[in-house]
Image (tube, rainbow, N blue to C red):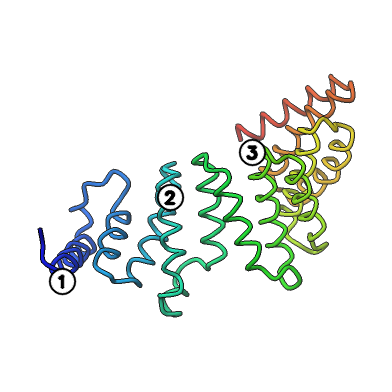
Amino acid sequence: DLLPGERGPLHAALARALESDPALSVSPSGVTAELAFHWFAAHNLPAAFSASAQAGAEAMRLAAFAEANAHYERAIELWDGVPADVRATGPGLVDLIRSAAEAANLAGEYARAAALARRALSLVDARSDPMTAALIGERLGRYLWISGNSHEALAECRAAVARLPRDGDPAGRARVLGSEGHLLLLLGRGAEALEICEAALAIARTAGARREEGSILSTMCAALSYTGALDAGIEQGHEAMRIARE
């Protein structure tokens, strides 16, 4: 029932009150989500951008994945309307899109996740930043697999492997190689998967990348079973479980 021009100032007043006293918030997901809503409704785009990016991260910590995706996508929408100095205080555009994609994936919106990953990949210069391009390509392959596009998923994952720089982050290199091995396993190509996973495992162990090591060992557990080496597969599976608990 408010007249034009009355609603925005009220939202701005609420946002300022919440910033000065976050205890006024009754939101179970934290004050950042409310701030994002009020600053956007108040047409304060810089404040809405910063709050939306923070609200996305907060929602991810709370496993509110659909909400996180909505916050991240709002921040992405606002990107072009926000001054450079404000953008510099938060995550970059590619990182925002990657976060939105992962949130969409965890919320079950697999096609949306793949579309966002494609956009992020299009914004990265694979020649000057091959590691980032490879990591995004690995995620795209995962999202496509979950969407049911198995052969396209493997193609994207292999393209990601091809982008890997030899001097790139070892944990990232192990992750991308391990993903190719995992997709080959899921396609029933256990022997091929095992060969790739052995190379990925060596990289992960040299780097002390325990999360990647556990994931690769889990794939190897099944891949060894495909080749008939059941005892070795069980041993790798137990080690993967120990790392997961760790």
Location of residue 169 (image quadrant): bottom right
Q: CA gap, disc 3 to disc 2?
A: 20 Å
Above or below, 118 against 193 in this view is below
Precedes in sequence: disc 1 or disc 2: 1
Q: Amino acid at mark 1?
A: Gly
Name the one closer to the observer, 201 or 109. Answer: 109
Residue with the mark numbered 2: 68
Q: Does 190 sit left or right of 100 as displayed?
A: right
Give the residue type at disc 2: Ala
Disc 3 vs disc 2: Cβ atoms closer than 8 Å?
no
Task: Give the mark nearest the N terminus, 3 or 1.
Answer: 1
Q: Is residue 91 above or below residue 177?
A: below
Mark in front: 3 vs 2: 3
Which of the 4 image quarters holds residue 105? top right
Q: Do the numbered discs 1 and 2 sit on residues whose CB atoms are within 8 Å?
A: no
Q: Are marks 3 and 1 in contact (CB under 8 Å)?
A: no
Instruction: Answer with mark 3 or mark 2, whichever residue precedes in sequence.
Output: 2
Residue 146 image label: 3
Q: Quadrant of residue 172?
A: bottom right
Other residues around mark 1 within 10 Å, as few (<14) / some (14–19) / many (≥20): few
Q: In terms of secondary structure, where does tag 3 sit? A: helix
Task: Please tell me how crowded label 2 is: few (under 14), some (14-19), or many (20+) other residues with Cα within 10 Å.
Answer: many
Image-based side of 191 in relation to 129, left or right: right
What amino acid does circle 3 point to? Ile
Q: Which residue is at 38% across, 55% downward? A: 55
Disc number for residue 5: 1
What residue is rendered at 72% in x and 25% in y? 238
Judged left or right of residue 67, residue 140 is right
User: Which element is circle 2 on?
Assistant: helix
Give the x, y percent position of residue 67. Answer: 40, 47
How far across and how far down the image is residue 150, in percent?
Answer: 73, 39
Q: Nearer the viewer, mark 1 or mark 2?
A: 1
